[in-house]
Image (tube, coloured by chain):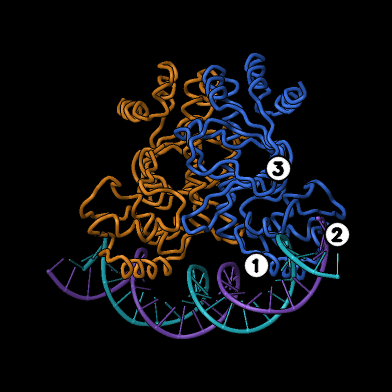
Chain colours: A blue, B orange, C cyan, D purple
Amino acid sequence: MRESEECKKILENKAMFKMASPEFMDKLVQSAHLHNAGKGKVLFIHQDTADKFYIVVSGWVKLFRETLDGAQAVVDILPAGHIFGETSIFENDSYPYSAEAVEPSVIMSLPLSLLKQEIEDNPKLALAMLSAMARYRKQQDREIEHRTLQNASQRIGCFLLRLADQEATGPITIHLPYDKTLVASRLGMQPETFSRALGKLKDATGIKVKGATVELKSLDQLIDYSCSACSSEFPCHDLNA
Amino acid sequence: MRESEECKKILENKAMFKMASPEFMDKLVQSAHLHNAGKGKVLFIHQDTADKFYIVVSGWVKLFRETLDGAQAVVDILPAGHIFGETSIFENDSYPYSAEAVEPSVIMSLPLSLLKQEIEDNPKLALAMLSAMARYRKQQDREIEHRTLQNASQRIGCFLLRLADQEATGPITIHLPYDKTLVASRLGMQPETFSRALGKLKDATGIKVKGATVELKSLDQLIDYSCSACSSEFPCHDLNA
DNA sequence: CGAGGGTTTGAAGTGCATCAAATAGTGTGG
DNA sequence: CCACACTATTTGATGCACTTCAAACCCTCG
């Protein structure tokens, strides 16, 4: 069966499941499903009852929270390989945010009940999840810091740095992974502000912007500009979860 | 020995340790120490090497991150009973924030090595910690949302609501737990902004403010005002960690 | 080519920060 | 119990960053 083959390969490559038992992995693959989600497809809504968790197979998924009058706060935008909805196990089985595909995406869905069971039975998995959660928590701390201490241009510079290969020493080309409007929301600002702030960043650092492509002579250009308003030392890798 | 008696009692009451083995608890109590920390005492600094984690026994502890030029972002302000520094286990043994006592406080210090060991040996404890971490993560999501979607006055209203007994129906009196300046930093605003925003909140909702005391006829006054700019339904308890 | 979404630009408004100074509040020693 | 010193809080005036509303521009794709 094609689908389960594919799911298996993806699941086995997830760091979190390296420690899982073979029986669990089998069961997981059995009940895995792939879904094609068009742009704008809503996968679930904040506070919905949760019985599945998900993995982004390809595309991009936005996690967000929305008020009654439609204002929304983007919590994160996830690339291929990322898990989401899995924390609902500890949240009274309800999702702590809404999820929407922001590009045509392929999403794998998996039953939370299996995960819940295996986490209780397999300490190794619990540890792996704990570790992932701690990493995420740290990222959130950083996010709060950045929104407090960095201005719009600095946040953009920081975002670009995180997209780049942080070991590189020479000239670099960075491609924005999705819409500028979406980047703006990810960074907690309006599209207009993003546009203007990117212009300011360009003037201040000498980077070159053509559409979704950004070229820089060296990372230092951005580091000097953005990292001065951040509490962390520069190589600030995310160690993907 | 007085000290270890006291530590024991506190540790046994922590939800997280209900699942711990008796041997572990014994060892933990053995190596526990109480410290008196005056106002302003710095307990550790962001990115210090971590070998201890802590519990607030009494007083208040501020967790924050600071840039080179002294600007700081407050991550959280913890009351008695809260654990901090424990995530360093997963962070390459370095603290993800700085910690400072903001009132004269008593702090219990405990070796991370013991916790690390027990988490690996005792699945129940790992689960308890996982659950606590998930709860914290959700709080962080909410924090990011609030800083994006709520204005200063609404954030204050929301803060007051979380201090109050959310089941109450009649008139309520709320006491600010610490300095207004500190509340302001906790909410990500300047003291001046706090003062003015509180005034605006007073005008808009009819609450009464006298020093550190706030009186309201009913919670609804604040709910209408603050929760309209939030994605969650009102009774939004924190379920303390 | 034309429609529609993404992006930029302009003009004006709002909210919060900043700087400066007045006022209230608290604890201390006399 | 009072006066002083010091800190917390408030108030005023001003500036800046970001938002909002509006319109133009651009790019892609049918």
Chain name for mark 1: A
x, y percent for residue A118: 56, 20
Of labels 1 and 3, earlier in sequence is 3
Chain of the residue under label 2: A
Judge left or right: residue A155 versus residue A98.
right
| Residue picked out by circle 3 | A79
Please state if B82 lies on the left or on the right of A153 as rendered: left
Residue type at mark 1: give it.
Thr
Quarter of the image with the C terminus of chain A in it: top right
Give the secondary structure at mark 3.
Answer: loop
**Mark 3 closeness class: few <14, some 14–19, many ≥20 residues within 10 Å:** some
Could you tell whether A129 is left or right of A68 in the image?
right
Using the image, determine if residue D27 lies above or below residue B121.
Answer: below
Report which residue position mark 2 lands on: A217
Q: Does dot 1 land on a helix, a strand or a loop?
A: helix
User: Is A165 left, or right, of B171 in this rendering?
Assistant: right
Residue nearest the observer in this picture, B130 or A37: A37
Earlier sequence position, callout 2 versus callout 3: 3
**Looking at the picture, which amino acid does disc 3 mark?**
Pro
Q: Residue furthest top?
A: A23
Label 2 with label 1: CB-CB less than 8 Å:
no
Disc 1 target residue: A193
- Closer to us: mark 2 or mark 1? 1
Q: CA distance from mark 1 to mark 3?
A: 24 Å
User: Looking at the rendering, in which quadrant would you find the N terminus of chain A?
Assistant: top right
The reply to whether residue B182 is in sight is no
| Residue B11 visible in rendering | yes
**N-term mark: 2 or 1:** 1
